[in-house]
Image: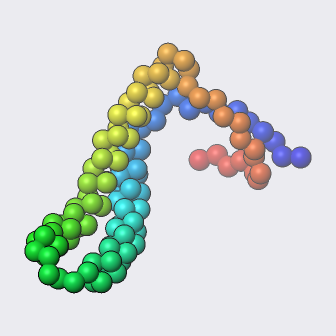
Amino acid sequence: MAKTAKFKIKRINVLQASIVASIVAFFFSIIFVLIYGLFLYSIMSSIPVKDQAITTAIPFIGTAFFLAPILYGIIAFISTAIFTFLFNLVAKWLGGIEIDVEILGEVQED
């Protein structure tokens, strides 16, 4: 039978959590932009280029696809920083979040 232990999350490092979230959001948005870009390209390539509005929108669309991962990363950094800051404030008042974990192997001390 595995041993169980209780831990309490009392504080989250704001900078570390924000950096991790922004990197994950950046790479996730690159995948999203590539998939959406291929989808949009397949639609745009089937439209005849008689309409001036479509041809003038292409540079804007390309710029938006380039900037999307950067903006996702910035927004993720800011929102995670706000969330972790608020979590740390509330955790001081309420004592944090208690979690139960199951110990599967030997516990090693650092």
Q: Is residue 12 above or below residue 32?
A: above
The residue positioned 56% from the left and 20% from the top of the image is 95
How far across and down, in percent of the image, does residue 60 sit? Answer: 15, 66
The image quadrant of residue 97 is top right
The answer to whether any part of residue 29 appears in the image is yes
Q: 55 left or right of 12?
A: left
Viewer-proximal residue, 16 or 41? 41
Q: 106 left or right of 56?
A: right
The residue positioned 20% from the left and 71% from the top of the image is 62
The answer to whether any part of residue 59 appears in the image is no
Q: Is residue 45 above or below residue 16?
A: below
Total numbered circles = 0
Viewer-proximal residue, 33 or 81? 33
Q: 75 left or right of 87?
A: left
Q: Is residue 89 above or below residue 63?
A: above
How far across and down, in percent of the image, does residue 103 sit? Answer: 75, 46
The outermost residue toward the right is: 1
The image quadrant of residue 40 is bottom left
Q: Is residue 42 above or below residue 81?
A: below
The residue positioned 35% from the left and 40% from the top of the image is 79
The residue positioned 76% from the left and 53% from the top of the image is 105
How far across and down, in percent of the image, does residue 25 sit? Answer: 38, 56
Q: 5 left or right of 12?
A: right
The image quadrant of residue 53 is bottom left
How far across and down, in percent of the image, does residue 83 sit? Answer: 40, 34
State the scheme by which the image is colored.
Answer: rainbow
